[in-house]
Amino acid sequence: MLGTLLPGRTYQIACFAKLWSGNSGESQFEVTLQVTDSDGTSYKGICKRIINSSTWTECVGEITLGVEGTLTGLIMYAETPTSTVDFLVDDFTAVLVEVPTQQPTSEPSGRPKTLSPTNDPTNEPSSNVSSFRIR
């Protein structure tokens, strides 16, 4: 995620989740972004939903990537409150919602990096830098 999501920009993060077919009932599901910068590590909640094994449930939220000093790490977590719940995640996207008027001073030079779908036979980067999809 580092180098793909840029400081000072707002993104809509979305995915679909459901419990693995062997699980019964419902469970809370959440997506969290771990941000590491010059000020330390913080966790930004993006979305929370209740999921089950029969229906794909969309979890969607927006986040503005605020950074103190230098951004050194970004990790996206999809999780449930307990480690005994198996779940599936599909169609994860991060779409640029808002571009700041001034470009951040820490923006990399050259062509921005993008993620291509893992099943893309060409495995070539897309020229669309406002979103990516992981399958």
Image (spheres, grey):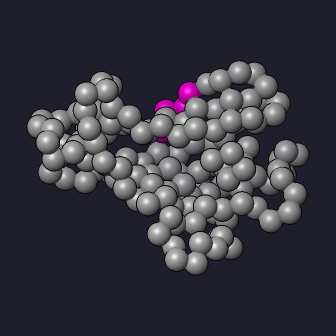
Q: Residue 75's spot in the image, x, y percent?
A: 58, 38
Residue 22 figure quarter: top left
Of 124 and 66, the residue lying toward us: 124
Residue 120 image position (x, y, % from top left): 51, 73
135 lies above or below 21: below
Tell me the chief SS of the magenta region. strand
Does residue 104 show up? yes
Q: Residue at x 80, y 65 (%)?
A: 111
Which image quarter is the C terminus in?
bottom left
Residue 32 relative to residue 90: left or right: right
Magenta part of the protein: which range?
43-47
Please provide percent x and percent y for residue 110.
86, 63
Residue 108 versus residue 40 in the image, above or below: below
Residue 114 placed where, x, y %?
Answer: 66, 62
Q: Nearer the viewer, residue 23 or 69?
A: 23
Residue 133 is a magenta residue:
no
Q: Is 11 drawn above or below residue 117 in the view shown? A: above
